[in-house]
């Protein structure tokens, strides 16, 4: 009987593995998520189930305490691996690192390495609503909150009633523990150590005792994997759920309310991380509503959290129209507050000054607040990059940002730079400085309950890349692509044909982001997206009475003379917010990098510019350059299709077919983007397409009429797209 049961168990395991291999649910991992509650046991189980060779030794080594938490060393001598760390979670990271080395084909017979994280907090933000929808989520519904959408009232356009979003009617449902455990494991395997399960457009309800009990259950699943729980909170919570008449941060009763709430949370979740806050932005309440500053609001929460070692991540994504240029507003609001934030507050800043566009200048706030802790926020979910229909590998965008921030802004957002400054100030050793500093990096997740977690298998690479860069922000994007593709698509395949296919996948990944920039918004153009859902082009969007800075025309500033937003010293002077040397480079259209030209300048259609298109450096007029970039983007989308075709028969067939289908949509969309933007801009330039640019296949009037009618929680289906264009 026992034997039968074992056979049955093995068979069902095999079945699960085969099925899951096809739907992407396995991610970049092998085996299953250990359900142990001890971190050390998880590390041992992972090694037992996947390591091939002499069993590794795991050693707690207190002398490594000087290194940032989670650091580890691996030595392999004569095939015998030893992992050491000051903490159990460091041993777990070491175990995953060791497995990754073996599974990606690295030499694991003789190695000696030490790994330490670039940032102490490596955190995912989930924009998950308590009703189970995910704002800008294109991979199904929330894995954290599972209330039924059917309970929601919808308007004629299918959009969920705002009231119902903020105040979901039904009680929380218990999420699948197994799914949460797999999520925790996936994060731990790449060093992510924190998460925020609820949307920054936060429901006050999440702080009710009823919901906090649910958060406690999540935290209990996450803890053994080294994942700390944080919550996004609504600043008006004391009024909405506390019955107070104000949420003024200087009001004694408000402070008391938060103190008590924080105490309640720590009683349930002793290692709770803290709060993430979106305040006075896009209709969210905040301290400004009571005549107080962001610093006063953040500090009130920070004081409540301080006794428990909690922190506040306060977002700088604000753009109340204090200046005619939206790109300047966050800086104008926050920079003067430098030095006023308590030391357990960190300002969370989107990589660019507008909003997660395919390419932005870096936000001038980085490095502009030397007395304030700052952290970056990236977006993994592809709100502005074709949702889960387009294949976009985002590590090249993030490494571009990191390089700019380090080299130009000299911004102390990572340990390395903090360490350098502390050496200069002779305040003890480099390592001490690292340990005492609050450093963090965050990204908006693309995870949902779709079988592949991220909407498609290729999109998983961005979750993976965020984790790897948060751990080591010096890693090259191509190395991360290589690791991910080997682990996810080519595990155990080292034949020549697979090696060729692997090279094709990497080529596709590495060209994908620039392809999108080219077919959507080249040369520094930005925000030419369709209204609301941000899928597809709508440079011609016109919503009577809408905020001007929600309209594409505000950003492109197309007219008879030329194209682009003059942010130079002769225009809005956003260039003046950058460090002086860089500001000078940006300010002159002759020296401004060509890929940010229209971000900073209004350039005449006929002006000769020098730019790079693909591998060619060309001198030609702005209009010709624009046409060539759109054409190149479309050509690149086609090239990506060809890259993918080379994988046929060499990777999982379902994954192959799914991505092949999406690349077809992507290429079709690239055509839509090229035609929509060029035909529209042509109404201003009145110039013909150059001979080597394909004629448009669309009619501008028909494109203007396209309305997809989707919510902010979904990716358009192929059928819908085919029916409108
Ligand atoms: O990118 C914009 C999105 C909003 C989002 C907001 C933010 C959560 O369109 O959906 O709201 O940014 O970052 O707060």
Image (spheres, grey):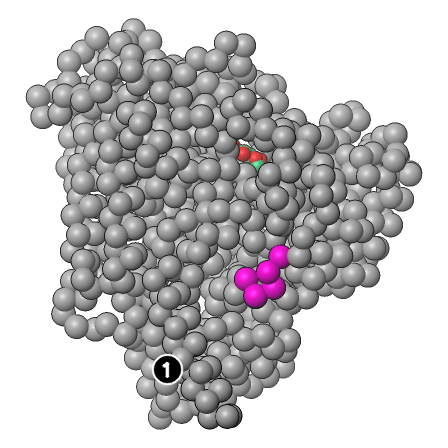
Instruction: Tell me: 69 left or right of 693.
Output: right
Label 1 CB less than 8 angstroms from ligand 1: no
Q: Residue 264, relative to residue 703: is it above or below?
A: below
Residue 478 visible somewhere in the drawing: no
Taking the view exactly as shown, the residue that stands out farthest to the front is 1
Residue 246 forms part of the magenta stretch: no
Instruction: Tell me: 295 left or right of 119.
Output: right
Range shown magenta: 175-179
Q: Residue 382, relative to residue 493: is it above or below?
A: above
The residue carrying pointer 1 sits among few (fewer than 14), some (14 to 19) or many (20 or more) residues within 10 Å by Cα, namely: some
Which is the main secondary structure of the residues drawn in magenta?
helix
Could you say which is closer to the camera, residue 454 or residue 547?
A: 454
Q: Residue at x 28, y 50 (%)?
A: 659
* Label 1: which secondary element: strand
Instruction: Tell me: 309 left or right of 644.
Output: right
Residue 176 forms part of the magenta stretch: yes
- On the image, the x and y values in percent for residue 433 come to 61, 62
Residue 239 visible somewhere in the drawing: yes
- On the image, the x and y values in percent for residue 366 come to 53, 40
For label 1, the residue is 111
């Amino acid at each position: 009987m026992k034997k039968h049961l074992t056979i049955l168990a093995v068979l069902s395991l095999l079945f699960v593995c085969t099925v899951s291999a096809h739907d992407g649910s396995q991610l970049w991992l092998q085996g299953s998520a250990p359900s142990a509650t001890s971190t050390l046991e998880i590390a041992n189980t992972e090694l037992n189930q996947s390591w091939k060779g002499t069993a590794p030794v795991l050693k707690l080594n207190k002398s490594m305490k000087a290194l940032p938490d989670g650091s580890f060393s691996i030595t392999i001598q004569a095939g015998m691996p030893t992992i050491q760390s000051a903490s159990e979670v460091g041993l777990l990271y070491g175990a995953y690192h060791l497995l990754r080395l073996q599974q990606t084909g690295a030499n694991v017979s003789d190695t000696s390495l030490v790994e330490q994280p670039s940032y102490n907090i490596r955190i995912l933000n989930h924009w998950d609503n308590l009703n189970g929808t995910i704002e800008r989520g294109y991979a199904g519904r929330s894995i954290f909150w599972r209330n039924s959408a059917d309970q929601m009232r919808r308007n004629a356009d299918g959009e969920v009633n705002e009231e119902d979003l903020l105040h979901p009617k039904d009680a929380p449902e218990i999420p699948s523990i197994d799914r949460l455990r797999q999520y925790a494991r996936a994060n731990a395997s790449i060093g992510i150590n924190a998460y925020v399960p609820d949307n920054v457009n936060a429901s006050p309800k999440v702080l009710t005792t009823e919901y906090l009990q649910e958060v406690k259950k999540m935290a209990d699943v996450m803890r053994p994997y080294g994942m700390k729980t944080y919550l996004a909170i609504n600043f008006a919570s004391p009024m909405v759920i506390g019955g107070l008449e104000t949420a003024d941060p200087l009001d004694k009763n408000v402070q008391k309310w938060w103190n008590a709430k924080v105490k309640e949370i720590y009683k349930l979740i002793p290692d709770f991380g803290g709060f993430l806050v979106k305040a006075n932005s896009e209709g969210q309440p905040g301290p400004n509503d009571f005549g107080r500053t962001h610093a006063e609001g953040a500090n009130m929460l920070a004081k409540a959290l301080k006794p428990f070692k909690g922190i506040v991540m306060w977002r700088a994504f604000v753009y109340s129209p204090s200046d005619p240029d939206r790109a300047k507003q966050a800086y104008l609001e926050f920079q003067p507050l430098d030095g006023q934030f308590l030391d357990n507050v960190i300002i969370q800043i989107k990589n660019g000054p507008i909003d997660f566009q395919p390419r932005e200048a870096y936000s001038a706030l980085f490095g502009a607040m030397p007395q304030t802790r700052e952290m970056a926020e990236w977006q993994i979910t592809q709100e502005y990059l074709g949702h889960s229909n387009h294949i976009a590998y985002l590590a090249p965008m993030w490494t571009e940002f990191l390089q700019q921030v380090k080299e130009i802004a000299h911004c102390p957002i990572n340990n390395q730079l903090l360490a350098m400054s502390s050496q200069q100030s002779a305040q003890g050793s480099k390592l001490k400085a690292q340990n005492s500093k609050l450093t963090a990096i965050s990204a908006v997740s693309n995870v949902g309950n779709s079988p592949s977690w991220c909407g498609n298998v290729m999109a998983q690479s961005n979750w993976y890349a965020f984790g790897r860069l948060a751990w080591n922000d010096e890693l090259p994007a191509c190395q991360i692509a290589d690791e991910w593709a080997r682990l996810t698509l080519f595990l155990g395949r080292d034949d020549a044909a697979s090696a060729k296919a692997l090279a094709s996948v990497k080529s596709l990944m590495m060209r994908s982001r620039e392809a999108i920039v080219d077919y959507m918004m080249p040369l520094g153009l930005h925000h030419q997206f369709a209204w609301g859902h941000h899928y597809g082009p709508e440079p011609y969007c016109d919503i009577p009475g809408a905020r001007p800075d929600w309209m594409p025309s505000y950003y492109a500033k197309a007219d008879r003379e030329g194209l682009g937003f003059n942010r130079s010293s002769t225009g809005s002077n956003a260039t003046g917010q950058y460090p002086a040397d860089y500001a000078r480079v940006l300010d002159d259209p002759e020296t401004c990098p060509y890929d940010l030209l229209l971000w900073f300048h209004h350039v005449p259609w006929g002006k000769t510019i020098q730019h790079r298109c693909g591998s060619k450096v060309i001198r030609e007029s702005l209009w010709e350059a624009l046409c060539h970039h759109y054409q190149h983007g479309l050509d690149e989308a086609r090239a990506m299709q060809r890259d993918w075709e080379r994988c046929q028969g060499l990777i999982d067939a379902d994954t192959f077919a799914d991505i092949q289908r999406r690349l077809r949509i992507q290429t079709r969309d690239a055509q839509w983007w090229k035609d929509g933007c060029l035909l529209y801009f042509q109404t201003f330039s009145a110039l013909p397409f150059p001979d080597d640019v394909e004629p448009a296949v669309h009619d501008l009037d028909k494109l203007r009429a396209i309305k997809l009618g989707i919510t902010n929680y979904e990716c358009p289906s192929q059928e819908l797209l085919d029916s409108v264009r």
